[in-house]
Image (cartoon, helix red, strand yellow):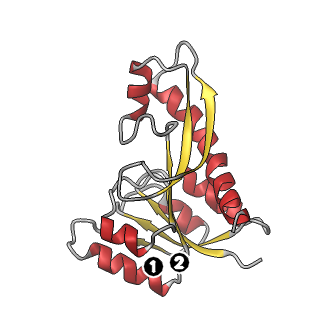
């Protein structure tokens, strides 16, 4: 099997990154993580890059040329797939078009519900009885790309933002890898 060269974008703790790294080490998993990009130099997820000897770059998003630099880096590494795993920066239309159909994201709600940030507090405020996560293609509209896979669970009576986040992350760690497998089984 020829694995797809993949780059994972992160901004935070990297729990989904860790799950993707673990999956990518399996023989039949369709991706090989060649690069990790972070927009934050202190992102804890970079520790996984170091632990698993995966090259990484911290790209300062305040630099007006950062996307051009990023495109050059990704092209040098021959990246076929970009996974946004807790990357908290909106990519430009130009960048998305440069990798059209090759960028996927994981979002902590059942899209199209609760796009954007502060997801867990909005879910609790709305008194939803079910939530989950969505893996989708990235397009020009925030959290609006074609859905690849969704996983859901029932919300308990005494949920907090923290408990909801933990439950969601637990299913995200499986869903992201399942979506990638599904995506490349269709090709």
35 sits to left or right of 28: left
Identity of the residue drawn at 62% across and 58% down: 20
Q: Is mark 2 on a helix, strand or loop?
A: loop
Identity of the residue drawn at 57% across and 21% down: 155
Residue 45 image point, x, y percent: 49, 57
105 sits to left or right of 18: left
Identity of the residue drawn at 32% across and 57% down: 90
Residue 55, relative to residue 23: is it above or below?
A: below
Displayed quadrant of residue 133: top right
The quarter in which the N terminus is drawn is bottom right
Residue 58 image point, x, y percent: 37, 69
The residues tagged by marks 2 and 1 sit, at their Cα atoms, a distance apart of 5 Å
Q: Is mark 1 on a helix, strand or loop?
A: helix
Q: Name the residue under label 2.
A: 79
Residue 157, relative to residue 27: is it above or below?
A: above
Residue 83, relative to residue 76: is it above or below?
A: above
Identity of the residue drawn at 20% across and 72% down: 64
Label ID, residue 119? none
Between 185 and 64, the one nearer to me in the picture: 185
Mark 2 vs 1: CB contact within 8 A: yes
Label ID, residue 74? 1
Displayed quadrant of residue 4: bottom right
Does residue 58 appear anywhere in the picture? no
Badge 1 crowding class, 10 Å Cα cut-off, few under 14, some 14 to 19, many 20 or more, is: many
Does residue 51 appear anywhere in the picture? yes
29 sits to left or right of 47: right
């Amino acid at each position: 099997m020829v694995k797809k060269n993949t780059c994972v974008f992160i901004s935070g703790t990297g729990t989904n990154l860790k799950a993707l790294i673990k999956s990518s080490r399996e023989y039949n998993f369709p991706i090989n993580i060649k690069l990790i990009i972070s927009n934050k130099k202190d992102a804890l997820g970079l520790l996984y890059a170091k632990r698993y000897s995966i090259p990484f770059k911290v790209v300062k998003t305040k630099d007006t040329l950062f996307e051009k630099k990023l495109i050059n880096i990704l092209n040098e590494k021959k990246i076929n797939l970009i996974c946004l795993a807790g990357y908290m920066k909106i990519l430009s239309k130009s960048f998305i078009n440069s990798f059209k159909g090759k960028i996927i994201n994981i979002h902590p709600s059942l899209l199209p519900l609760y796009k954007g940030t502060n997801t867990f507090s909005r879910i609790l405020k709305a008194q939803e009885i079910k939530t989950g996560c969505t893996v989708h293609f990235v397009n020009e509209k925030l959290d609006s790309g074609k859905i690849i896979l969704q996983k859901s669970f029932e919300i308990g009576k005494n949920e907090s933002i923290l408990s909801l986040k933990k439950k969601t992350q637990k299913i995200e760690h499986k869903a992201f890898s399942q979506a990638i497998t599904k995506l490349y089984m269709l090709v």
